[in-house]
Image (cartoon, grey):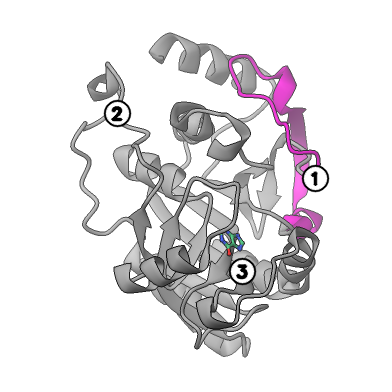
Amino acid sequence: MIKLIEETVDYLKDKGFENPEIGIILGTGLGQLINDVNIIKEVSYNHIPNFPTATVEFHKGKLIYGTLAGKKVIIMQGRFHLYEDYSLQDVTYPVRIMEKLGIHTLLVSNAAGAINLNFKKGELMLIEDHLNLQGSSPLAFKGVEKLGERFADMSAPYNTEINTKFKAIAKANNIKLHEGVYASVFGPQLETRAEYRMLKILGADAVGMSTVPEIIVANHLNLKAAAVSVLTDECDPDNLAPVDISEIIAMAGKAEPEMVTLFKELISTL
Ligand code: HPA
């Protein structure tokens, strides 16, 4: 993998992706942050050597380099999911690339269902910890120790200083920001009532199909990491209505201005 990473990094450096400080992964319906970015370079995923290629059509699939709130950022517009038939190593490959390019911090957004029924759809949740329920690890491969500590420490996977800042920014801007545990599942099917009950018993506040692999690799590489979920549906097993994916995407869009404010203000402090 080291050779592949070097090849990808050389290509991007050649394209002008110079010394980014912060990496950002934009999740479903959270793309508006891009409007505030002074874009210097952008490359489609399918032009980047050794990059997995984007499949789900509502993701644009571009790597963007620019400045945001005075910081050099690298943005993944569109991410890779396990349920699209990518491996955990594919899903996390871009994190390894961003780290080699020089980022010190990884920020992630996603859409998630609310397991904690005190949380309502359209609200945001700062991820404080996670449950990896995707059945494997992005670190479970031969040679992983050449890239970092195989037995990566996960005692504080989400950076507490960044989370403290997020909470202060939310308060100052009158944004409701819950805090909780995110469970990652494989997907793409949504959960059964029994699965929602299980997730609650396990201690999850929200459930989604992403983020955890990227956060594990960020920790493997000693990056500071943080993530915010937009809650798009309420997972009440006793009153479960059929989920409409277009409604989920619409709900993610509704919360977007708040998410953009949180990220922009946070980045200006990093
Ligand atoms: N389950 C899993 N993933 C999700 C959900 C959900 O209810 N909502 C948004 N992403």
**Mark 1 highlights which residue?**
58
Q: List the residue tagged with mark 3.
A: 230
The part of the image, by quadrant, that contains residue 148 is top left
| Residue 174 drawn at (x, y percent) | 62, 90
x and y percentages locating residue 163 in the rendered image: 41, 70
Which of the two discs, 1 and 3, labels the residue nearer the N terminus?
Answer: 1
Label 2's element? loop
Q: Local crowd at mark 3 within 10 Å, few (<14), some, or many (≥20)?
A: many
Q: Locate residue 125, reporting x and y percent.
A: 52, 74
Q: CA distance from mark 1 to mark 3?
A: 17 Å
Q: Secondary structure beneath disc 3? A: strand
Residue at mark 2: 140
Q: Name which residue lies at 60% across and 65% down.
A: 263
Of labels 2 and 1, earlier in sequence is 1
**In terms of image quadrants, where is residue 257?**
bottom right
| Residue 156 shows in the view | yes
Q: CA distance from mark 3 to mark 2?
A: 29 Å
Rendering quarter of residue 158: bottom left
